[in-house]
Image (tube, helix red, strand yellow):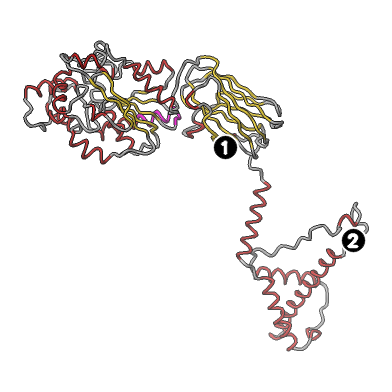
Amino acid sequence: MNAGSNRADKKYLKIRYLKNCILLGSLLFGFFLFPCTQGCGDEPADKRLDGKEEFREPKEFSGMDKEMHKEHAVELHEAFEAGRDADSIESYGDADSVETHDQIFEEVADSLYETDEGAAESIKGEQDTESHEIEPRCRQNDDPLKFLSIDKDLVPGGDLQKSTAQSRLDSDCMAIGFSFVAAKGMTLEAKLTPLGGARFAPRLQVFDTFAISKRGPAAILAQDMSAPGHAADVSFQVPWSGEHVLVVSSADLHGHGTFAIEVHCTDGCSLSATRYPIVLLHGIAGWKGGLLNVVDYFFEVQDTLIKDGYDVYAPVSASFNDQNVRAVQFAGQIDDILASTGAVKVNLVAHSQGGLDGRYIISSMGYGDRVSALVTVSTPHKGTSIADAIMGLVPGLAQDMIAPVVDFIGKLLGTGDEQDIKAAMKVLTTDYVRNVFNPANPDDPRVLYFSFAGHTCGKADIICQVRNNGESVDPILIASFRIMQILEGDNDGLVGVESAKYGNFLGLLSADHWDEIGQLADVVNLSFNHKKFYEDIAAMLAKMGF
């Protein structure tokens, strides 16, 4: 067979394929336009097609290769024509006519097989959407924490005598959380009640703070489910102090309706707690090797607060060093506290240099998202003149005044080396703190800053003592107190009142620098109750929701 004959056969196949397509289309159109009226099903014909049924357009081709379509068409035609003796190509006309048919076929075939990529993507998107709508977003055995949203603080200020709230499950796959603060040892009762004829099956769960912070797997403290329309209730003892959450959902995660939630204390109700753990940051000589090695820096403060119900930690850092070193040591232990408790943040309560460490942690180390409040007690936010005197930065100050102070600081730090003493004091000088440290550590707007200042009186200053509840300076601080009085005025023996004021200043304490932390071992601390002072700070933080 010659080349012309092959070409004619190919065109013949194309034309036959086009005709077959037209024939098939006509049959399909006739089927939908003239449906059968008998024997086509159990329902009458007027119900099977009453003019109201939606006519479904056939979907376009979506993405198959053009050549693949053409090859498949030829295969279909060959199968369709199998066993039949085709007439000659002349039956379709002469060569010119074949050319005309060929051109028509090519134009129509191209329009049939061209696939618009945008349309294909659109179809795919619709299919994905349909699939998403069919697949349920949640199932009955799903963990409600996957869908948890915190509604509000159920117990602002920590009052657990009786707190109530109302809310609503508006859609499927909802779990609403109500946070509350409770102390270790409390016994609480909580109740979930559907309202207004709501018929969902209520599920009430109590989780620890990990459910909020996502720092690790959350623990279920108690849970209860009830029949539709009935109340669910739980009673449980709080295993640790801090933030917890009541989680409300329907048992199958598909129920809707309004509900009331309440929680109240039934036992241990005198205990107290803050939302976030309290972390005590010590000043110089706060650890081994110094004068205070034999006693706690914050004398019995941690134990007292824990007995009250608070969650309290007292990390340690270098006895004397600059903020860069001490703060890094503190920060690592803060990370451990957050990881072990699951708390979102911590409250920092700092004495003396510990307050500068706290500011460094927040600002230079970027812990503003992990610290709720910083409370500083007699922290030298503008430096201290005692450090200036030791460093020789105060002209005209008699050596006999400085020597006792240097000796005292050496004992405090556990060293007799003057260079070690000066190294410890350098970062506390007025010039360094004001011109180097403060500009490098601005306040973080996410953190609240509070401060207290200590004020003591000379042994012979009777008027001052009367005004300050009989407070007089401890003998060990007399030399430094006199220098500070000359250079800065009112002070606590090591830090001036004006230097200690920072952020929200909360007032003066009738106490010297050691009275503020119950030292030395509370023996001479007769005019100031330091334990009550730190209990008041904790109560303030709890009332503020921290």
Q: Quadrant of residue 455?
A: top left
Question: Which element carries disc 1, helix, strand or loop?
Answer: helix
> For mark 2, what is the residue?
36
Q: Say whether residue 398 is magenta.
A: no
Residue 458 position, x and y percent, is 17, 17
Q: Quadrant of the C terminus?
A: top left
Looking at the rendered structure, which numbered label has been put on residue 314? none
The residue at 71%/62% (across/down) is 59
Q: Quadrant of residue 539?
A: top left
Question: Which element carries disc 2, helix, strand or loop?
Answer: loop
Residue 369 position, x and y percent, is 40, 37
Tell me if residue 277 comes above or below residue 531 in the rendering: below
Range of residues picked out in magenta: 333-343
Specify the amino acid type for callout 2.
Cys
> For mark 1, what is the residue?
146
Q: Is residue 20 left or right of residue 351?
A: right
Q: Is residue 155 left or right of residue 280?
A: right
Circle 1 Cα neighbour tier, 10 Å, few/some/many (<14 / 14–19 / ≥20): few
Residue 440 position, x and y percent, is 26, 41
In this rendering, the label closer to the viewer, 1 or 2? 1
Q: Is residue 48 left or right of residue 440?
A: right
Q: Quadrant of residue 318?
A: top left
